[in-house]
Image (cartoon, helix red, strand yellow):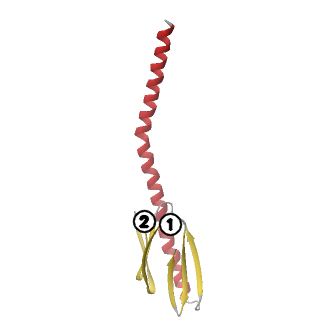
Amino acid sequence: MMQAVKGQVSIEYLLLLAAFFSALIIILPQVSFAVDQFFATSDTLLAKQIANTLGEEVRLFEFLGNDSKKEFSFSPAKEITLTTQNAAFLAATTQKQFSLALPNPQTNKITTFTKKFTITIQKQNNLITITFV
């Protein structure tokens, strides 16, 4: 009689474990998707902030003298791509792209960042340049 009770408890324990892992298998992909969307949205907000900040600073630099320089540091949650092409600056994520018209042509450059990076605005010879590393 005692042997049957122990066997029944073991089977119930295994059924509970199976139910727990089944629920985990169903829920885990949804949680992973939600976390990915959160990080992507965070990077999109950062890209918008970068474009807005640089827009304000470029307008300010138009009035400042030569050899003016300012640096900004940003840290993306996942990935952000910065592009300078002709007289345009683009900050892009997997979800959206934000652009900014610049007063003069820039060196064509495309860089993707996954960790902290620095953007430098500099004015020399009455030309405003934007670099990022």
Decide: few, some or many residues near mark 2? Use Cα within 10 Å; few <14, some 14-19, many ≥20. Answer: many
Camera-side residue of 90 and 63: 90
Taking the spot 52% from the left edge, 84% from the top edge, the residue there is 59
The amino acid pointed to by label 2 is: Thr
Q: Is residue 29 above or below residue 46?
A: above
The residue indicated by pointer 2 is: 93
Assign a secondary structure to mark 1. Answer: helix
The amino acid pointed to by label 1 is: Leu
Taking the spot 42% from the left edge, 65% from the top edge, the residue there is 93
- Residue 110 location, x and y as percent? 42, 74
The residue indicated by pointer 1 is: 46
Q: Quadrant of residue 67?
A: bottom right
Q: Looking at this rendering, what residue extends furthest in the bottom direction?
A: 125
Taking the spot 42% from the left edge, 45% from the top edge, the residue there is 30
Q: Are marks 1 and 2 in contact (CB under 8 Å)?
A: yes
- Residue 92 location, x and y as percent? 42, 69
Q: Quadrant of residue 111?
A: bottom left
- Residue 31 location, x and y as percent? 45, 46
Cα distance in 3D space between marks 1 and 2: 9 Å
Camera-side residue of 6 and 63: 6
Decide: few, some or many residues near mark 1? Use Cα within 10 Å; few <14, some 14-19, many ≥20. Answer: many
Which mark is first along the chain, 2 or 1?
1
Taking the spot 46% from the left edge, 63% from the top edge, the residue there is 79
Assign a secondary structure to mark 2. Answer: loop
